Image (spheres, helix red, strand yellow):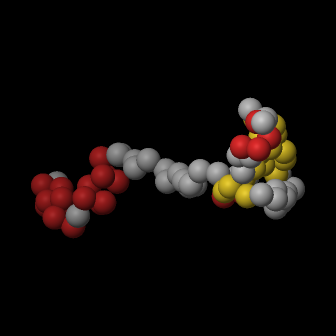
Amino acid sequence: MSGIITRIVSEGSHISRHFLGVRSAPLKEYSAGFKVKARLKLRCRSCYFVRVDGRLHVECNEHGRHRQREIFDVKALW
């Protein structure tokens, strides 16, 4: 029995983790913030428009990289 354990420990941490039942956390797809554009468009079926604080945003549930927002127009405040 001790030969099996020493072989597992010497082969690397991946096998020893598997033997001990330790699972690594699943990878999450990260996305940058919003793309800031003057002209917004829907890029796929799950994209939709939302108005937040007077600005138009595009949100997407499937692809985080489809997120867009309108440029902040200072002249609209006047």
12 above or below 28? Answer: below
Q: Quadrant of the C terminus?
A: top right
Percent coordinates x, y for residue 62 in the rendering: 73, 52
Percent coordinates x, y for residue 15 in the rendering: 30, 60
Q: Depth check: 71 or 2 in front?
A: 71
Q: Say if residue 60 shows up in the picture.
A: no
Q: Quadrant of the N terminus?
A: bottom left
Left or right position of 30 against 70: left
Percent coordinates x, y for residue 61 in the rendering: 74, 47
Q: Identify the residue at horizontal 82%, vertical 51% (top origin).
A: 47
Counting the numbered discs, the total is 0
Left or right position of 6 against 51: left
Q: Identify the residue at horizontal 75%, vertical 50% (top origin).
A: 70
Q: Say if residue 49 shows up in the picture.
A: yes
Farthest-out residue, bottom: 11
Q: Depth check: 40 or 10 in front?
A: 40
Farthest-out residue, top: 53
56 above or below 38? Answer: above
Q: Identify the residue at horizontal 30%, vertical 47% (top origin).
A: 20
Percent coordinates x, y for residue 43 in the rendering: 82, 61
* Residue 66, image quadrant: bottom right
Farthest-out residue, front: 78
Q: Depth check: 4 or 16 in front?
A: 16
Q: Identify the residue at horizontal 18%, vertical 59% (top origin).
A: 9
